[in-house]
Image (cartoon, helix red, strand yellow):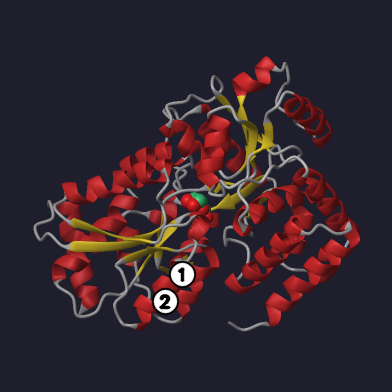
Amino acid sequence: MRTLLRQAAVIAGLALPVVHAGEVEVLHYWTSGGEAAALDVLKQQISAEGHQWQDFVIAGGGGGNAMAELQSRVLKGRPPAAAQIKGLDIQRWARLGFLEDLNNIAEQQQWDNKLPPVVADVMKHGDQYVAVPVNVHRTNWLWVNKPLLDRLNISAPQTWEEFDVAAEAIRAAGYQVIAQGDQPWQHATLFETIALSIGGPEYYQAAYVDHDFSALKSSTTEAVFERYFKLLNWITFDDQNEWNENTAKVINGEAAFQIMGDWAKGEFKNAGLTPREDYLCVPVPGTAGQFLFNIDSFAIFQLRDVENSQIEAQNALVQNIMSESFQRTFNQNKGSIPARTDMSMADFDACARSSMNDFLAASANNALKPSIAHGLATTGTVQQYFYEKIAELTATPTTPADASSQLAKAIRYGLYVIK
Ligand code: GAL
């Protein structure tokens, strides 16, 4: 019955304006300036169609406690219509049978022709679409305060040797070198970009996606930690630990750099800054042409015993997310690139255009890899052990050999634990 309703609603939704206003409750954790501005685009599209958006906000960068809150609501039998869930977590909810079959909408809107396989695969459980993608973020970006570097006569570093030279000069001039918050997911984000930089895509795949023990406990991982521990010397942790507070330090010239996914660009945009003039986006040294991806998406929950209008509102949400106008405006605000690869990038900024070029090129060159820090590469359990170990080693660095062996054990342990 629900499927029939859904089919009817899809057809009606495409042919006519929606007639039954319904409420659509959406769980998300987008609360920074740039994130909120991006999500507003969707809220406006939904209310323009006569539906009511109901926020279910769990604040906290990188997801925070959102999953625990979601679990408790789903187990009480009252899931939200949609929840911001990523990567392998989508599969978990789908396996448990909680997610809606979106294939009718996907066929109507021809998702298979619009999404690259690397995105579509994450949204599907078997052959069934169960989630809808909003974007593709890249994590291996170095954000640079351009006027500050210009004043010090330094160019954006492309190698770690250049980075160290620049860092010395920046610190000597009295500025923070790398702005970063003291939070496990932020350390994990920094670490994964160093892993890609030092080890390259094949090593990254073997260690952080396939969890091959001999790749994890290896001289390459030792070299990764050597560079990671060196970089920690260029970070001054203070009481500003949110990622966006640290982006603000680069924006206001307190710090020269931040290594962060391109949600940081949403903050630069929200502050009215222009890439290449006010700030630079350059690949983390040693990762030019390589791409660590983090795809944001909404998993769509099965709603039981609800008004038809709520199903219609849920359908409208899904359809709007895949519309070209949403994918354009949302991503211009969010800092990411569209999940759809059939759109012109002409009115995106220089960072987004180079991100899309690198995304497509990396995909052809086997240099496109899923982010472990953001839930695209591995299970939530392994990710948790990875977070904890990197956070511990960040607080208490050890020798690279010991760190490599500890990380390998933590990941192996995470693989065996059932949570
Ligand atoms: C990521 C998420 C991004 C961004 C960031 C900071 O995990 O995918 O969309 O919001 O966290 O909250």
Q: Is residue 116 visible?
A: no
386 w.r.t. 268: above or below: below
Where is residue 223? Give x, y as percent.
87, 51
The C terminus - image quarter = bottom right
Q: Is residue 177 visible?
A: yes
Badge 1 vs badge 2, beta-carbon distance below 8 Å? yes
Q: In the depicted view, which residue is nearer to us: 173 or 128?
A: 173
Residue count near mark 1 (Cα–Cα under 10 Å), binned few <14, some 14–19, many ≥20? some
The N terminus - image quarter = bottom left
Where is residue 61? Give x, y as percent.
50, 54
Q: In the depicted view, which residue is nearer to us: 62 or 392?
A: 392
Which residue is found at the position 32% from the left and 74% from the top?
A: 79
As drawn, which residue projects farthest toward the left? 19
Q: Secondary structure at mark 1?
A: helix
Marks 1 and 2, how far apart at CA: 6 Å
Which residue bears the numbered disc 2?
71
Question: Identity of the amino acid at label 1?
Answer: Met
Which residue is found at the position 26% from the left and 75% from the top?
A: 303
Which residue is found at the position 73% from the left and 63% from the top?
A: 392
Which residue bears the numbered disc 1?
67
Which residue is found at the position 16% from the left and 50% from the top?
A: 49
Q: Secondary structure at mark 2?
A: helix
Counting the numbered discs, the total is 2
Is residue 383 rendered to the left or right of residue 244? right
